Amino acid sequence: MSWLCRDPEISQDQLQGLAFEPRESRALVIEGKDVVGPHRIRFGREQPQLTFLQETNNTQQWSLGTDEQWNDWLAETPVQSKSIDSSRLNLILGGRAERPWGESPGLISKLPWSQQIFEKVKDRMFIHALMVRAIQRNTSCMFTRMWYDWKQKTTQRSLVYHCRTDVSWPRDMALSVTFLPDTLTTNAVLFGCDNKTTYVHGMTLSDIIISRLSHSDLPILHPMLVPAIFADIERDRQIELVREKLTQLGRRISTPDDNDESARSWSGQSMNEFLRAVKKRFVSQGKATVSNNIEDKEKTQASSDSSPKESKPRTETVVLWLEIGRLRIGLGNWQRQLRKMIEHVEELNEVEFTSNNSAIYTNNQLQQFRQAGTRIKERLQELVDEYDEYIRECSHIKAGVTLASQLELSHIGRSDANTNLKISRVNLDVAEMTRRDGRIMRSIAGLGMIFLPATFVTAFFSMGFFDWNRDGTNAGGASGDIGIYSSVVIALTLLSVGLFYVLMWKARQQEESE
């Protein structure tokens, strides 16, 4: 545990969790001394010198990649400023590893040096073992600070910072900063600096950091200067993610034909317009669902064939909704780290940079540190307020999608209720017609009861089994063949009744099985 053991040495177990792949990195040295006139920014031995107008900071920059270049830089570059009145910043921007398949959480642990050079850089830049733990931390973001005495390397006390961004999204970074108050020297190493030209004006992340530092007009190099720039960079990364997710969600709910146009217009729309579009889209989907339920068999089959293609965007919308929720949590976590930075800047102004430490700092330096700290605090507070806005926007998006989903379900329920009402009305009409048919059948049955006896008697006595005109003793009697008639009638009656009951029994059995 770091609070129980603060040994600065990196163990072999921790080194096994790191990978060493030498690649191009940047080294930067800034002298914070009052200089009037232009200064030079050196880009290496074989590159031309570029002159910029700058009033305060003298900056030198190197592009290093091989072990030989690093050994030369470590041997030739002084550890601290030659002037006791000048603050100094030694900054290494470690290049980020690249893979053909894109980003992965473990890329930041692939350091841009060989293991031999890393040992030298670690000793030179006062990298604490806690930095390795922060690099291997694949959970949430962090900002820590502690006072530490490097007894084996120097008797000076130091202020050590460790920063880590969230690994849940691409281009995560880590930062190690060690401030030596006795020499006003700040040693900083940024891990995972993206070298791709993916920023404005064809600039890399290294170019942006160097540009901000070289054009800074702070009176002195404050120890929280690099962490504040680190927070600014993380702000750009996370806010870009928020806008991207908002655009993607707008594309999901727009019509397929207007994907490209709607994707360009979503970023500039207000939340009210966004929610209205969400509602409109969901309502249209609800209407389509209800209409599909009452279409004929062919259209139903066609819609079922196309349903696999339409199910994927719906799934992606749910995943996107979850990603926005995780992003909101990530914004809140980093906002907490920003508040810790603000509290620490206030602590420095109230405890470290006070007249009680006049033996370490001059009165002019104390005033400059407090002024720089105030500016850094104000910038960090602006970031906190901006994060509040985007956190509320993420919450608004999630609430809007939830509300739109409820409106969709409510609309579908109302449409289904209307459809059921129409079906009930049709059933009432059918029942009314059935009742009328029943009346007609009762009339027909009545007529049958009236005429059936007379018809039966007429047919019965008209048969040849009776001889009403014969003379003699058996005159008017029945014929001897009447028994045949009786047998046939009884047999046919039993057969018809039997077949009727057998067929009815089979029909009931089939209905029960189904």
Image (cartoon, rainbow, N blue to C red):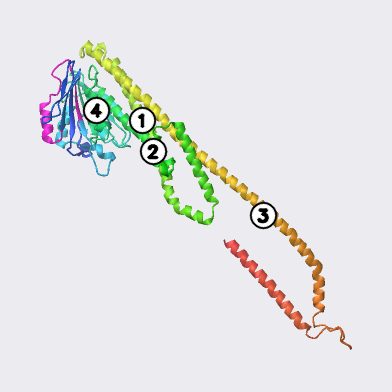
In this orientation, which residue lies closer to the viewer: 90 or 438?
438
- Under mark 4, the amino acid is Ile
The magenta segment: 64-92
User: Considering only vertical position in the picture, is 293 above or below 178?
Assistant: below
Whichever of labels 2 and 4 marks the residue nearer the N terminus, that label is 4
In this orientation, which residue lies closer to the viewer: 131 or 310?
310
C-alpha distance separating marks 4 and 1: 24 Å
4 vs 1, front mark = 4
Whether residue 322 is visible: no
Q: Is residue 143 magenta?
A: no
Relative to 83, is 367 on the left or the right?
right
C-alpha distance separating marks 2 and 1: 29 Å
Residue labelled with disc 3: 430
**Quarter of the rendering occupied by the N terminus:** top left
SS for dot 1: helix
In this orientation, which residue lies closer to the viewer: 232 or 183?
232
User: Considering only vertical position in the picture, is 481 above or below 419?
Assistant: below
Residue 502: % across, % down: 64, 70
Q: Residues within 10 Å of mark 1 (few under 14, many from 20)?
A: some
SS for dot 3: helix
SS for dot 2: helix
Residue drawn at 54 percent across, 44 percent down:
412
